[in-house]
Image (cartoon, rainbow, N blue to C red):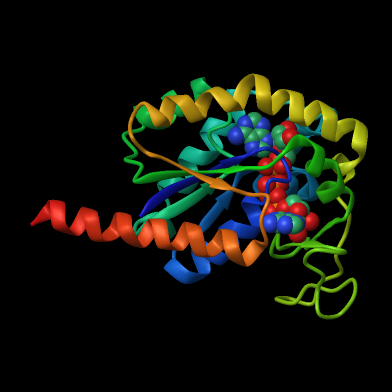
């Protein structure tokens, strides 16, 4: 399956992406994780992206689209993928379509803005595998260490309340219209993200399983 997961910053995209891709055996491609990796390695891509990310704005399309194109053409995506954090604008959605990539479903996690700042201030992420934890809602088994790879967790610099507000505004202005774009193609599956992590995963996996059965029937 070729999937996209959408939602405001902190809606729980990365958390759900990990659960879904573990279950379906497909890779999760997070543009935010790739960009943070590039910054850490000090590459040209990272240097070009950094100031936009620090301000909570979108990194220019030419940088991000080229990056996604390269990942999607790799061998590991040949049996499907889940895109997390892309597309984030109508222009990006249109370029994805121009690449000839067929999307099976777009999952949109809806969370009230008031909840987002609390989620971000308690978020801790793994620099190794990108896993996302929360001090209160999803703590790691050993405080400060990733359950999956034992790396030391850190708080993202763009998770401070001021940058979070800019990121939310960027989301409402540039990314939310993408939901309508995919709804028009009959691909949008909306999920209430104000529930517990396990509840949300169950709803998503049930919806994807129904979609898989429907696609199999349609093929016959
Ligand atoms: P995104 O990838 O959309 O930015 P994350 O998956 O990193 O969001 O989640 C943001 C923060 O909220 C993390 O600290 C995560 O542990 C926490 N979180 C994710 N889903 C839920 C949920 N359903 N309820 C409470 N906290 C959640
Ligand atoms: P995320 O990890 O998804 O919260 O993304 C962190 C930051 O990376 C965003 O605030 C943007 O600055 C940048 N970013 C991630 N994905 C994209 C994208 N598809 N288009 C533009 N900028 C992006």
Answer whether residue 44 is visible to the viewer in this image: no
Tell me: residue 57, above or below residue 24: above
> Which residue sits at x=48%, y=52%?
82
Query: What is the number of callouts on the image?
Result: 0
- Which residue is at 36% across, 42% downward? 103
Q: Identify which residue, 163 or 32, lies in the foreground.
A: 163
Asked whether 17 or 111 is in front, the reply is 111
Of residues 56 and 194, which is closer to you in this image?
194
4 sits left or right of 209 in the view: right
Residue 135 position within the rendered picture, expressed as x and y whole percent measured from the top left: 87, 64
Q: Quadrant of the C terminus?
A: bottom left
Where is residue 198 shown, x and y percent of the image? 61, 67
Residue placed at 67% from the left, 24% from the top?
172
Rendering quadrant holding ligand 1: bottom right
- Res 186 quadrant in image: top left
- Left or right: where 82 falls relative to 128: left
- Residue lying at the far left in this picture: please name it: 220
Q: Quadrant of the N terminus?
A: bottom left
The quarter holding residue 98 reads top left
Q: Which residue appears farthest toward the bottom when viewing the image?
A: 142
Residue 200 visible in rendering: yes
Q: Is residue 60 above or below residue 67?
A: above
Residue 142, compared with residue 30, is above or below; it is below
From the top left corner, tell me how far across and down residue 78 is, in percent.
35, 56
* 108 sits left or right of 163 in the view: left
Percent x, y of residue 11: 68, 46
């Amino acid at each position: 399956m070729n999937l996209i997961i959408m939602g405001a910053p902190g809606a729980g995209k990365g958390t759900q992406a990990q659960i879904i891709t573990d279950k379906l055996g497909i890779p999760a491609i997070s543009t935010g994780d790739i960009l943070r990796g590039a910054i850490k390695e000090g590459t040209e891509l990272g240097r070009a992206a950094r100031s936009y990310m620090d301000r909570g704005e979108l990194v220019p399309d030419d940088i991000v689209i080229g990056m996604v194109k390269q990942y999607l053409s790799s061998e590991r995506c040949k049996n499907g993928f889940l895109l997390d954090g892309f597309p984030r604008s109508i222009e990006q959605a249109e370029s994805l379509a121009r690449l000839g990539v067929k999307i099976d479903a777009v999952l949109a996690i809806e969370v009230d803005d008031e909840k987002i700042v609390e989620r971000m201030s308690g978020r801790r992420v793994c620099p190794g595998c990108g896993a996302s934890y929360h001090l209160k809602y999803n703590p790691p088994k050993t405080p400060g260490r990733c359950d999956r790879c034992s790396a030391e967790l850190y708080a993202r610099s763009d998770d401070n309340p001021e940058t979070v507000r800019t990121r939310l505004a960027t989301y409402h202005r540039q990314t939310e219209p993408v939901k309508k774009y995919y709804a028009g193609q009959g691909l949008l599956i909306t999920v209430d993200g104000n529930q517990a992590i396990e509840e949300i995963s169950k709803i998503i996996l049930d919806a994807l399983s129904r979609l898989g059965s429907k696609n199999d029937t349609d093929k016959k």
